[in-house]
Amino acid sequence: MIREATKKDLIDMLEIYNDAILNTTAVYTYKPQTLESRQVWYNQKLEEGCPILVCEQDDKVVGFATFGPFRPWPAYKYTIEHSVYVHKDYRNQRIATKLMQELIKIANEREYATLVAGIDAANEGSIKMHERMGFECSGVIKKAGFKFDKWLDLVFYQLDLKGPKIPSEE
């Protein structure tokens, strides 16, 4: 079941996120997050009006996704960047795809024009999923990060959305 996240979901979401930090290059950071830092993140997302979706199976959150501003400058207001994470024991079950489908629906309803994904270049599963969903590669930043004693390349993918009926600079 895909639904909006609640505060009670933060423990499961923290487990998923910290596993990604400690064991993958999906997140370019080194130290696990605390529950307090995730609560701040959650509250900030809500204040900004950003969706936080979870996939729940057997009363457990097994994946989550969100989007937020791509850059803080006003001309980027129609561009958003998303994140999607799935519990290590539930990968390859199309959970990320289902979460992404709902995020894309919300993004289109809100009249965003471009959805951006920043993906570690070695993450073939994520790249393939994004390509199946219509995302196109828009560039690579070589040596964008350093983790697990190696340089990491960051590939950007983008999906063109419906966008606003009448874009404005206001």
Image (spheres, rainbow, N blue to C red):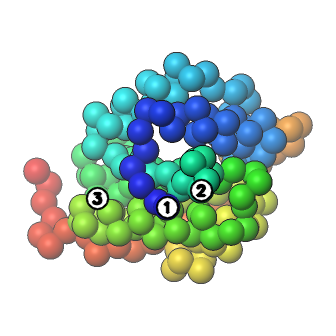
From the viewer's side, name the closer residue of 61 and 70.
Answer: 61
Tag shown at residue 118: none
Disc with the residue nearer the chain's start (3 vs 1)? 1
- Name the residue that disc number 3 marks: 78
- Name the residue that disc number 2 marks: 57
Q: Quadrant of residue 119?
A: bottom right
Residue at x 52%, y 34% (from the top left corner) = 10
- Tag 3, which secondary structure? loop
Circles 2, 1 touching at the beta carbon (< 8 Å): yes
Is residue 124 at least partly visible in the picture? yes
Circles 3, 1 touching at the beta carbon (< 8 Å): no
**Amino acid at dot 2:** Gln
- Name the residue that disc number 1 marks: 1
- Tag 2, which secondary structure? strand
**Amino acid at dot 1:** Met
- Marks 3 and 1 sit apart, C-alpha to C-alpha, by 28 Å
Instruction: Answer few, some or many: residues within 10 Å of disc 3's Cα (few below 14, many 20 plus, some between 14 and 19).
Output: many
Q: Nearer the viewer, mark 2 or mark 3?
A: 2
Is residue 140 at least partly visible in the picture? no
